[in-house]
Image (cartoon, helix red, strand yellow):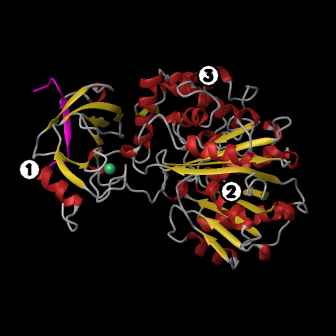
Amino acid sequence: MNPLRGRLAVVGVAEADLGVVAPGLTEQDLIGQAATRALADAGIDRTEVDALFCASSVQPAPTLNAAEYLGIRPRYSDGSNIGGSSAISHLLYAAGAIEAGLIEVALIVYGSIQRSEAGRLITPASVSIWEEPFRPRWPLTMYALAASRHMHQYGTTREQMAEVAIAARRWAQLNPKAFERGPLSVEDVLTARLVCDPLGVRDCCLVTDGGGALVVTSAERARGAPKPAAHLLGCGVAHWHRDISQMPDLTVTAATESGARAFAMAGLGPADVDVVELYDAFTINPILFLEDLGFCAKGEGGEFVAGGRIGPGGELPVNTNGGGLSYCHPGMYGIFTVIEAVRQLRGEAGDRQQEGVEVALAHGNGAVLSSQATALLGTEATLN
Amino acid sequence: MTESASPWIGYQEGLAAGELRFQRCGDCARAVFYPRVVCPHCGSTALAWEISSGAGTVYATTVMRPHRQEPYNVCLVDLDEGFRLMSRVDRVPADGVRIGDRLRLLKEAGTAPVFVPADRS
Ligand SMILES: [Zn+2]
């Protein structure tokens, strides 16, 4: 068995204020909110944190900013940034560091005020010199190209992609923290302003402020935690390209590898997963990831999401918080997939709580389908 | 290619001469684009310039629709020699580009490589 299986447990999760935050709040303030709330959730004092993980869209050395702000003095510091999947990759690196005896309690944090500051995605990623002359808009154009290819190759339709947005909205209507909770029909999605064919404005994620934090520790130490721990059963990271023009096949992402690694470590398969939390930057994303993670065959994702299968009451609950499409999207969304997975495992997801959740999958995507990171989290019962 | 030659400059010199240059690996024989100093397929540094015929096929395509501006095409083109790049198809409406369309390079010295439909003069 993989020595990292079950080695790490998530014992605290929290969001910062989400949506449009109070004027003048900074991303560090949001990190402060989320970290404080997550530590309280874990029943762990700030002074016990010896490791800090933070990816940022604005700071080149974000753990320095966050540690200074929080007044913690980590002995292990990881600001690695592979885009929106970073927080999930941090789970794997933290598990390795726990196994190596380097750390005991880690804080994984993220914050952004992109909506208040710019009203659009703030990203340090620039279009490369090989793509810049053609005026693509990062990252929108790149996802539109991937959607065009999936539609061409597999007959995926805009109606099927709209089903992803509808499912997200129906979940959001069950989540009081979600940003967009109004009614939304397939017709609304299809007739919304086209921004980058075949993507309309309702195929695109929100632009919100927000932040999140995870407190993680060893499985042994987690036994004393006030709330049930979410155990990291498996985790995998993979990336193959940075620019979309370097992606070998626009219909196949590196989630095929990150997912396979996570499932192999966990000794589980897609059929064992009770809830699925995927980074839905655009409506094509969950379709690609459900295929690449093995929930359906390649090319069948469009059909798979149709008919309400991934919405409330459907066969496979996907993005039970409302996702980046309807709940919140402060730039690098990955951390929120873990927060929701943990809440579903604990049974504290309120109106959207699924029954008998033992295994949850959290999947992050970074840049332009570039980096993929998959985590499988389970209850105490799944450890053995 | 000598060790000190810049792939970027070699590529730009090609564009200035109205050529679309790419590299061919001397060890694994695969096409390499964008130009670089090491083959991403096999790790070889035996990369040599070749000039593309400019014949290619649309692999993926989109229409950018910026607010209060003219829509424009952005696409990925697979060149017959076995490499892919981002580009645009001119001389057709922005929404008139289809995956699978055959293209030819518009040979205009000094500009980034832009394509037109293969059957368009
Ligand atoms: Zn080679």
Q: Nearer the viewer, residue A22 or A327?
A: A327
Q: Where's residue A346, x and y in %?
A: 84, 47
- SS state under label 2: loop
- In the rendered view, does A243 fall on the left or right side of A70? left
- SS state under label 1: loop
Q: Residue at x 75, y 66 (%)?
A: A36
The disc label shown at residue B118, or none: none
Instruction: Specify start and end residues of the magenta stretch as a single range.
Output: B110-121
- In the rendered view, does B63 fall on the left or right side of A154? left
CB of mark 2 near ligand 1 (< 8 Å): no
Q: Quadrant of residue A264?
A: top right
Quadrant of the drawing holding the C terminus of chain B: top left
In this view, the mark in front (3 or 1): 1
Q: Where's residue B40, x and y in %?
A: 36, 52
Q: Nearer the viewer, residue A335 or A20?
A: A335
Disc 1 residue type?
Answer: Ala
Q: Chain of mark 1?
A: B
Furthest residue to the front?
A: B27
C-alpha span from label 2 to label 3:
33 Å
Q: To which residue does mark 1 refer?
A: B17
The answer to whether A177 is drawn above or below residue A126 in the figure is above
Q: To which residue does mark 2 refer?
A: A17
